[in-house]
Image (tube, rainbow, N blue to C red):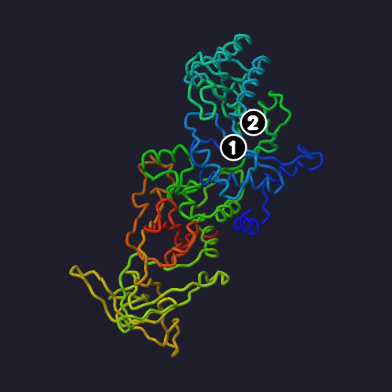
Amino acid sequence: MSEEMKHIEETEDVWSNFIHDFIEEDIAPGGRFAGMKVHTRFPPEPNGYLHIGHAKAIYIDFATAEKYNGLCNLRMDDTNPTKEDVEYVKAIQEDIAWLGFSWGDRFYYASDYFGKMYEIAVNLIKKGLAYVCECTAEEMRENRGDLTNPAISPYRDRPIEESLDLFKRMKAGEFSDGAMTLRAKIDLASGNFNMRDPVLYRISHMHHHRTGNEWYIYPMYDYAHPIEDALEGITHSLCSLEFEDHRPLYEWVILHSELQCQPRQIEFARLNMNHMVMSKRKLRLLVENNIVSGWDDPRMPTLSGLRRRGYTPIAIRNFCERIGVSKVNSVVEYSFLEHCLREELNISAQRVMAVLDPVKLIVTNYPKDLVEEFEIENNPNRPEDGTRTITFSRESWIERSDFTEEPVKGYFRFFPGNEVRMKTTYIVKCTGCKKDENGNVIEVYGEYDSATRGGTTPDGRKVRGTIHWVDARNALNAEIRLYDNLFTEADPESGELLDLINEKSLQVLENCKVEASVKELDSKSSFQFMRQGYFCFDSQDSTQEHLVFNRTVSLKDSFKKK
């Protein structure tokens, strides 16, 4: 286990929720699973990259198993070959491992059980609990009935032998897509529409990423999922709230499959956040329309996008724990995710100086050939992180916004006649500036007080402004990317998604100046550019020759504690 993951375990409180209450009831003496090891699973569909909403489910599934010294399986729900791909399988594994969870050798595919599922379906037909239906999807909708009228299926009383023959021929690929389905024979008048003879199998001639063209029929999720859970010995099948109405079907399949294990399904509210979409289908739309650069674009809510932006597994796990587990749907503020990240980075991130909109400062009374070295703390919150050496010379880069000729009230940085403390080095008095033909400031001038080395004021005079800077002699050029919300509306679901794209969600700054020490930092680490925010190297585009940084989050915390 990495030191970072140990830190997660050390900082997490023992958490509890209604799911754990159910589990403790089940494993207690006389309970449903008394004497058994708690066994959960995380079953993503490999049709896209995981997002922050999945992180909550991952946390609940894996951390619950950890709490009870149990097991958690990772299972790819590859029952729909339409959009599935090996790329997504690998990305899912990488994301879960990055969060600090392990499935050991318990890695499965739903397709591992296709043969067993078919065998169970044949037995259901033989018992008169399933039949082949030739209704089209449109006819099924029309014959679905309502609360006062039962559904209708003209094929419900089809002879068992006929259904067995047709189902065998469906498997052999004799019929076209949509020509037939296999339906459970349950209750056409049920108040729960999921029990009105639901479809168990549909025909699809799609190539499967694992089984190739072996199968022409594929099981529906509501049929496959309980069988998979039972075959793997899952005790508690934890899933999102939309499956609550599907639970009777889950239990029906378990009961009539005659499998020894009988898992318990427990539902929780999924994660919804403002300024984000939590649909892989809609996220794919952004990728396919080139709105973003890919699934790992730092503006995406995918775990790979958040990782590239500089989010840490500690922050995401803390976020998942602190939002809690509920049976009621709600919307979590994106600012709270940022708040959790700032809390973690404020402690862990090394400080570095960078100038995003540079203008040159010339200290006119400083010797031209003199270069001084200063020790500066790497992290004021963690003295054990030590110090680093920076240089100071006659010319430095400062932020353009740190100079003005006409200061407003409360402005304490450079303006003619004002003194400013340059971080760690000296106090410098501004003496003026130089402009180009368009009136733009291209140089700022000042004079330093040699008696104020280290920023001290021996005579006790007050200097209210302190700025960051970068030595012009060894400053490195960099590209810096600033990110904002991808959508113009807090609720992107409120309109056409592609019409709500924020055209200013990415701002690219060229020719920024950064402290030379950044080249010594770990390429996977997060750090704070003083007064600017928290940043990281862009994992795709940054090189030693062309430094690219992503702003992870600003310093200002907009989250309001209730």
> Residue 491 placed where, x, y %?
44, 46
> Badge 1: few (under 14), some or many (20 or more) residues near its Cα, within 10 Å?
many
Nearest to N terminus: mark 2 or mark 1? 1
- Left or right, residue 132 beside residue 10: left
Residue 144 visible in the snapshot: no
User: Compared to 399, does 166 lie above or below?
Assistant: above
Where disc 1 sits, the SS reads loop
Q: Which mark is residue 551?
A: none
Task: Report if the CB atoms under discs 2 and 1 are less than 8 Å apart.
Answer: yes
Q: Which residue occupies 59% across, 57% down?
A: 4
Q: Which residue occupies 55% across, 65% down?
A: 347
- The amino acid beneath tag 1 is Pro
Where disc 2 sits, the SS reads helix
- The amino acid beneath tag 2 is Glu
Q: Which mark is residue 228?
A: 2
- Residue annotated with mark 1: 43
User: Compared to 87, does 490 lie above or below?
Assistant: below
> Residue 46 placed where, x, y %?
52, 36
